[in-house]
Image (cartoon, grey):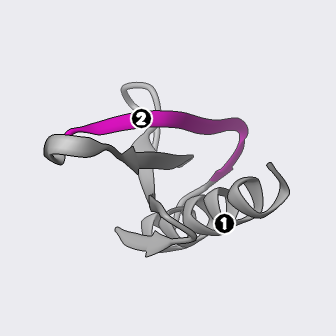
């Protein structure tokens, strides 16, 4: 997780359905608020794009979150 333009963003990989060996992309964008609370702004999933390398999916999820913060 890292801070980017006032948001906390992270990329992660969710395992596919049971008996599969692939991972699904997941990017998350969080916004800190007063009093230490945090609100989830967006959870980005790309289930159609799967890879068997977990680290690659985590990196791609982080890149996806960067793009969304930059564009919106």
Residue depicted at x 77% and y 64%: 70
Picture coordinates of residue 47, whole percent (x, y): 66, 34
Left or right: where 35 falls relative to 28 = left
| Residue corresponding to mark 2 | 40
Q: Secondary structure at mark 2?
A: strand
Task: Give the camera-side residue of 63 and 69.
Answer: 69
Picture coordinates of residue 38, whole percent (x, y): 28, 41
Within 10 Å of disc 1 (Cα), the crowding (few <14, some 14-19, many 20+) is many
Instruction: Give the mark nearer the N terminus: 1 vs 2.
Output: 2
Residue 66, numbered label = 1
Within 10 Å of disc 2 (Cα), the crowding (few <14, some 14-19, many 20+) is few
What's the distance in space between the residues labelled 1 and 2, CA to CA?
A: 15 Å
Left or right: where 51 falls relative to 13 = right
Residue depicted at x 49% and y 64%: 6
Task: Give the camera-side residue of 27 and 54.
Answer: 27
The answer to which image quadrant residue 45 occupies is top right
Residue depicted at x 41% and y 43%: 14
Picture coordinates of residue 15, whole percent (x, y): 40, 41
Q: Residue furthest front?
A: 34
Task: Give the camera-side residue of 24 and 7.
Answer: 7
* Magenta stretch prevailing secondary structure: strand
Left or right: where 35 falls relative to 7 = left
Residue 47 is one of the magenta-drawn residues: yes
Image: 59 above or below 24: below
Total labels: the figure holds 2
Range of residues picked out in magenta = 37-50
Residue 30, numbered label = none
Residue depicted at x 52% and y 72%: 4
């Amino acid at each position: 997780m890292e801070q980017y333009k006032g948001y906390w963003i992270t990329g992660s990989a969710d395992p596919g359905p049971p008996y599969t060996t692939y991972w699904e992309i997941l990017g998350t964008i969080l916004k800190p608020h007063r009093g230490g609370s945090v609100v989830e702004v967006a959870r980005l999933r790309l289930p159609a794009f799967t890879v068997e390398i977990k680290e690659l999916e985590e990196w791609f999820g982080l890149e996806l979150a960067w793009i969304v913060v930059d564009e919106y």
